[in-house]
Image (cartoon, grey):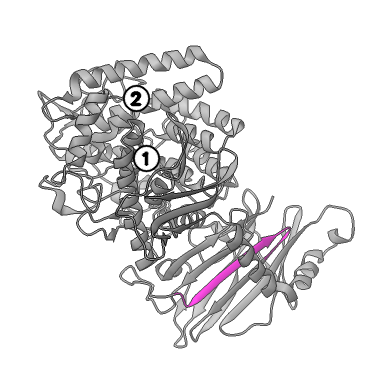
Amino acid sequence: MMRVGALDARRWAGLVFAAGPGDGVGLRLIFTTPDGERRDLEDWYWMVSRVGPHAPDGCYARMEFDLAAEPSPASRPVEGTLILEWSRREGAVALRAVAGVPGRVELVADDPWGWKTRWEEGPDGWRAGLGSTEIAAAFAPRARERVAAVVAWEPRSAPGPRSRPGASLDRAQQLLPELDRWIDDARTDWDRRRPRGSGAAEGLVEAVTDNLMWTVLLQPETGRLYAPAGRRWIFPKPRDETPTESTPNPDDWTVFGWDSFFNALALATASGRLAWDALLAGLESRYPNGNVPNWRSRLGGTPDRSQPPVGSFAALKLHLACPDADALAAAWPGLRAWNDWWVADKGGRPRREGLTRGLFAWGSDTALVPERGRLPEWEVGASGHQRAAWESGQDDLPLWDDVEWDPGREVLAMSAVDLCSYRALDLECLSRIARIFGDPAEAARLDDERRRIVAAMNRVLWSDAAGLYLDELPGSHSTRVAASNFLPLIAGVPSARQARRMVDVLRDPARFRGEWVLPTISRDDPAFDDQQYWRGSIWPPMNYLVLQGLRRYGFDEFASELAWKGALMFLADRRRTGFCRENFDARSGRGRGRRFQSWGPLFALGAIEEFVDTCPWRGLRTGSRLPAFVARGDAAVDGAVRARVEGLRIAGEARTVELSR
C-alpha cells in the first residue's frame, strides 16, 4: 500500500510517497520572493497561518501559509497567502499550490530521510521505480505563482497494458486536464461529509481532527505511522563528534511516551485506525526491559526513565470508542511489560518505590543513561533530580523544588501523589482489559495490587486537614498543591466524602478555579506568577485527566465548566493566531510554548466528550447541558444557545448530538 502525505516532519509543504519501509520518493514546495529569498523545509513551519482540513484517507487536504511572515520564531502569521491542496484517489494524487503574492512557486524532486531512490527527469515528467511499483509525476502548465501536478503509480509486475514501462506517466498525463475540478470537487465533498461542530461548537471538532491529521508522520525504516509531540519535536541525531559541534540534522523520528497515548485519543475523532497506529507506535518504542521511555528516536532515547503510564487507560478508552480486538491484543504485551517495569527488582526493592513501601516516586536509572555523545545537548550533564522530573512529564513543576534526590535508590525522596495515581489507574485498566480477554485470574491479581496501592495512599497521603492527597516527604506532607494532586479522582482512589473535599479545593477561586483553568500550581503558590512551562501555566493533559476524574465521581456540572472553559480558551487562541499551542497563561488565557503541539487539541476533545463519550466507568455517555457562559452570536436558535457535533464515529456508529442550556 502506498503511504502518501506530509509524512516527514521537515516537509509540511510537500508530500512523501512511501511504497514500503525505506522505499519512496518525495516532492516539496519552494517559494522564492522577488528579491531572491527562498522559503524551504523548516521555513514553512513559521509561516503556517491555517492548519486546514485533512481527510484520514487523503481524499482532500489543505494548508495555508503566510508568505509575508519572516521564517523565524519571532514572527506571527497574519493571513494565508499560499494555499496548498492535494487530493488522493485510487493510484494517483493531484497537488496544487497557488501563491497570492508575487514570487515563484516550485515543486522540486525530493529524497526524504536520504532514501536512495531518485526521480528521473524527462521532457514529459518525472519517473521513479519503487520496488515493484512505478511512480510518475506530470506537471500542469507552470506559472510563477502557481504549480500543479498529478502523481500516479502502477504495479510493474502485473500483466496487462498498465504494467508496461511508462504506464504511470501516461496515466498522470491523462489525469492532468481534470486536476482543478478533481481538487475542487474533493474539497466540496469532504466539506459536506466531514465531522464538524456548529453553533457554540463551531470549529470544535475541526480543531482536533485537522491538527492531529497534519501531525501524523512516518517511521521510514518500518513504514509505521505515528504521532509525535509535534512536527518540531523530532530530536537531532545523536552525535559522536565533539560535544560542542552543531548537529542540525533531525533523527528519522521521535516518539514521546505519554504524548503518544493522548494523541491516539484525539486521533480517534478522525480515524480509529490511525488512533490505534499512534498508540501501538508509542508501545513499540519500549526497551527490552519493558520501559516505554520518556522519548525515543531511531538513534537515541531515554532507557533510564519512562513517563506517566497512561497507555492502558488510552487503550481501554480507545477500544470502547473504536473497537478493534486485534489492535487491543497487539497492545496487551507492551502494556503488561510496562506495568511490570515500574516494580521490577532494583537492589532488593521495586524500581520506583517511594518513601513508604507500596507507594511510588519518580526516578532515573543512572547506569542506563546514554553516553555523552548519544545525548541531545540539553541532557548532557543533567542531574538525577532533573531526569526524574522529566520522567514525571511535569518537567519543572514547583512540587519538585522541595524534594531531594536519593542517590542510593535513584528516585526523588518522596511518595508522589501523581505517580501513585497513575499506577492505580494503570492496574485498574489492565484488569478490565484482562476481563475482555477472558482472563479473570489475571484481572483479580491486578485488582489486588491496585487495592494495596489505594489503601496505602489513603493511609499515608490523605490529609484530612487539607482535604487532599499530598506528596509524602521525609517526616511530613508537602504543603504545595498542583493540578496533579487531583489525579486520585481519575484513579478512583478517594471515597465519595474525600472526593467532595477535593472538589471543594478545586472550586476555590483562590486556589484553582477561575476564568482560565486549570493552573498547574495553586494560584496562591509563590511560583504561580512564573507562568513558565509547568510553573503555573495551563496544560492540556492535566485539564483532560482531571476532567475524567470529575466525571467519574459524578461532578458533571463542574466537569462541563472545566471542559468548556478549556475548549473556548483553546479555540479563541486558534482563531486569533492559527496555532495549536503547547500550554496557556493562567492569567490571560493566551497561548504559550510551541506553536503546534500535538496534545493541544485535548482542550477541545474534553468538550467534544460533553456531547458523546466512552469511558471505562460509565460506558457510552451522550449529552449534557451547556454552561451559562457558553455563547456565540450565531449560536442562538429561537432564543436558546445551542451547540452541535455531527459525523463523529463512536462505538461503530456516526453520531450527531445537539446540546442546549
Dot 1, how many residues are within 10 Å of its Cα: few (below 14), some (14-19), or many (20+)?
many
Q: Say whether marks 2 and 1 touch (CB < 8 Å).
A: no
Q: Tell me, for residue 294, which label it has, or none.
A: 1
Lower position in the chain sequence, tag 2 or tag 1: 1
| Magenta-drawn segment | 80-93
Report the magenta stretch's main SS. Answer: strand
SS for dot 1: loop
Which image quarter: residue 96? bottom right
Where is residue 173 shown, x and y percent of the image? 76, 73
Most distant residue in the front direction: 638
Task: Report if residue 83 lies within the magenta region.
Answer: yes
Task: Residue 581: tell me if it is visible.
Answer: no
Where is residue 575 shown, x and y percent of the image? 38, 65
Is 44 above or below relative to 481? below
Is 169 above or below relative to 372? below
Residue in the image at 36% along x and 31% along y: 552
Q: What residue is shown with label 2?
A: 424
Where is residue 635 shown, x and y percent of the image? 41, 61
Is 402 above or below relative to 530? above
SS for dot 2: helix
Dot 2, how many residues are within 10 Å of its Cα: few (below 14), some (14-19), or many (20+)?
many
Can you tell which of label 2 and label 1 is closer to the viewer? 2
Where is residue 461 shown, x and y percent of the image? 19, 24
Amino acid at dot 1: Asn
Q: Tell me, for residue 582, which label it has, or none.
A: none
Task: Report if residue 307 lies within the magenta region.
Answer: no
Label 2 to label 1: alpha-carbon separation: 20 Å
Q: Is residue 312 left or right of residue 460?
A: right
Depth check, front residue: 204 or 245: 204
Amino acid at dot 2: Ala
